[in-house]
Amino acid sequence: MRMMIIAEFFLVILKVLWAFVTAGAKWIVRPKEKSVAGQVCVITGAGSGLGRLFAKEFARRRAVLVLWDINSQSNEETAEMVREIYRELDSPMPKDGTVGGVEEVPPFQPQVYTYVCDVGKRESVYMTAEKVRREVGEVDILINNAGVVSGHHLLECPDELIERTLVVNCHAHFWTISTFLPPPTVHVSMRCSWSPSVPYQTTQPPPKQLYTTHTPPPPFLP
């Protein structure tokens, strides 16, 4: 019995040391960043905050963006920021040794689409998803970012706000996933607060704080 305990102890030590070795190797030899260029990316709650930052980050990676938000004005503002990024990427880049110091880059085609959708209503989610399929095509990446932030303690929240928080921050994830899967969609879900007494938050700045349920998302630069 004592020998088994000692053997298990040394086995645990070896596993811990091996974990440190593999982590150090991954830190030195970084994995190649997966390209999302040309892939269709749906971002919910894209009108402000983290959703807007995600949209800008994926635009820099040349993804085709489909922006969902309940506020059409703020959603269009995000779309205009994305178009500005597209225009910057589409402009010729100067390079030494070329005629006039300018080298033509390949045509850049990604577009941005905006849809008004209340993810707290599954009928709205299903209808908007069907419009996306007709007008854009199949979705490759889904980012469930939309969330309700109350800013109040639980006992200060009315029942309607608690119900709205649970529907948007929890139920909506199931509705969006069920409507976009089973095609080979990458699902990326923000870590959001389920309780009205806890602010909507992440432990790291975007776009590092990502959680996947299927195919891993493209790794982002640190």
Image (cartoon, rainbow, N blue to C red):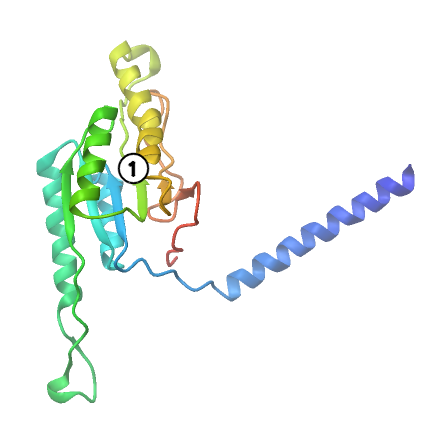
Give the x, y percent position of residue 203. Answer: 40, 40
Q: Residue at x 20, y 28 (%)?
A: 124
Q: Residue at x 24, y 29 (%)?
A: 119
Which of the 4 image quarters holds residue 4?
top right
Can the viewer see residue 145? Answer: yes
In front: 98, or 134? 134
How crowded is the residue under tag 1: few (<14 C-alpha within 10 Å), some, or many (20+)? Answer: many
In front: 114, or 54? 114
Give the x, y percent position of residue 107. Answer: 16, 69
Which of the 4 image quarters holds residue 168?
top left
Give the x, y percent position of residue 16. Answer: 68, 50
Number of numbered labels in the structure image: 1
In front: 108, or 4? 108
Residue receiving disc 1:
145
Above or below: residue 177 compared with residue 120:
below
Disc 1 residue type? Asn
